[in-house]
Amino acid sequence: MFDSLGQTSSETKPPSDLDLSPAAVLASMAKDGDPVPTGFAPLDARLRRGGVPPGRVISVGGAPFVGKTTVVADIALHVSQKMPVYALFSDEGRTQAAMRMGVMMGIPLEQIEEDPAKCATRLEEALGERSITLRKPDCDLATAADLFDFAASRTGAGNPAMVILDSIQTIPARRELDAGSEREAYKLFMQLCRERASGNGWIVLLTSQSNRASYSRRRAEENSVAMASFSGTAAIEFLSDVALVMSLPNESDQIVKVEMVKNRLVNSQNRLPKSFNVRYDSASGRMLEVDESSLEAANAEATRIKLAPAMSAVMGELAKGQELSGSELERRLKGRGPGTGTTSVRMAVRLLESDEKITSVYREGKGGGYFYAVR
């Protein structure tokens, strides 16, 4: 601070970490503390040093039923081996969250529903030294600030912890807080999360149905309108250190695409793609990564199943012993039944060739082209 003569006044405050040189910023990274693996492998692989340092905020966005809570419950189980976890599953409730965790720990869902008391004992034994506390969602203390205060009272200053806020669109930041607009409410909520995360050295994990997935696939002329609707909840992504967006699952294979739309903790050495694929595994109760080769194999198998009628029809025509051109095959099979349109017949021919069930030869001249016959 300077007085009217430009001299440093006696009220000058001591240096803080608010304003640092680039070199000092890099040096401060050493104070972040050891990163904590989340246990969600595709996420950890994309984070610097394989985990989340204390004092950070992770958000998971997407439509209902894409697997957000499943991912969060899985992370809670893993992290709770190293630090206490305090969670508010506001949308689906703590009963459903506890059941998810039970399935992940190897207890069949049918047994949980049939004898919950017996399974509670089994789950307690399976959890061992893990520490997870689930707050009742429908009560006066079901706010973000109250959960943070409870975690502070149980954990103590300077001790690590994770706070989970699931479905933040249903969780108020504080009691009796009138934030005005929806945009301001989200901003205050995220500011609270960042302050408590950095101030206490905790990891904050939250989910929301609000994210830019609603506009990312729109046509260019629609983006301005979609962006305007997104602006009210932009703070969720912008004030997160890591933000994931989960797409709706494909109808055929139930694959969910996950995009890392924000990553301040990027692992620049691995250079992994910003997106990856997951699918719900009923046996483990988890969302497991689907590698590209498996995905390609699954897509290829789905394509074969879809083209089975066309492949059968092509083989039927060629089995009559007559060599036929591609156009003649298309003409004969067109409209014969489901799956025998022009595109399907062409794809079926290519698959039969790759399977070495038919041969092809190219002839020049009028009426030429590729002709096919049974091998």
Image: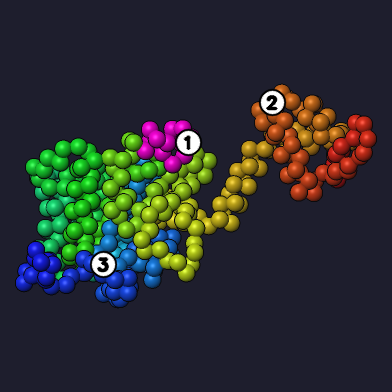
Q: Judge by depth and name the residue closer to the eye, 201 or 149.
A: 201
Left or right of residue 218: residue 320 = right
Can you tell which of label 2 and label 1 is closer to the viewer?
A: 1
Q: Which quadrant does the C terminus fall into?
A: top right
How many other residues sit within 10 Å of disc 2, few (<14), some (14-19) or many (≥20)? few
Left or right of residue 341: residue 10 = left
Which amino acid is tagged 1?
Answer: Ala
For image coordinates 17% across by 64% down, the residue present is: 199
- In this view, 170 is above or below 130: above
Left or right of residue 334: residue 141 = left
Q: Specify which label sits upstream in the sequence, 2 or 1.
A: 1
On the image, the x and y values in percent for residue 362 come to 88, 42
Q: Which residue is mark 1?
A: 220
Q: Secondary structure at mark 1?
A: helix
Q: Which residue is mark 3?
A: 54
Q: Which residue is mark 2?
A: 337
**Distance (Cα) linking label 2 and label 3:** 61 Å
**Distance (Cα) linking label 1 and label 3:** 39 Å
Q: Which residues are magenta?
A: 215-227
Task: Determine which quarter of the picture holds residue 45.
Answer: bottom left
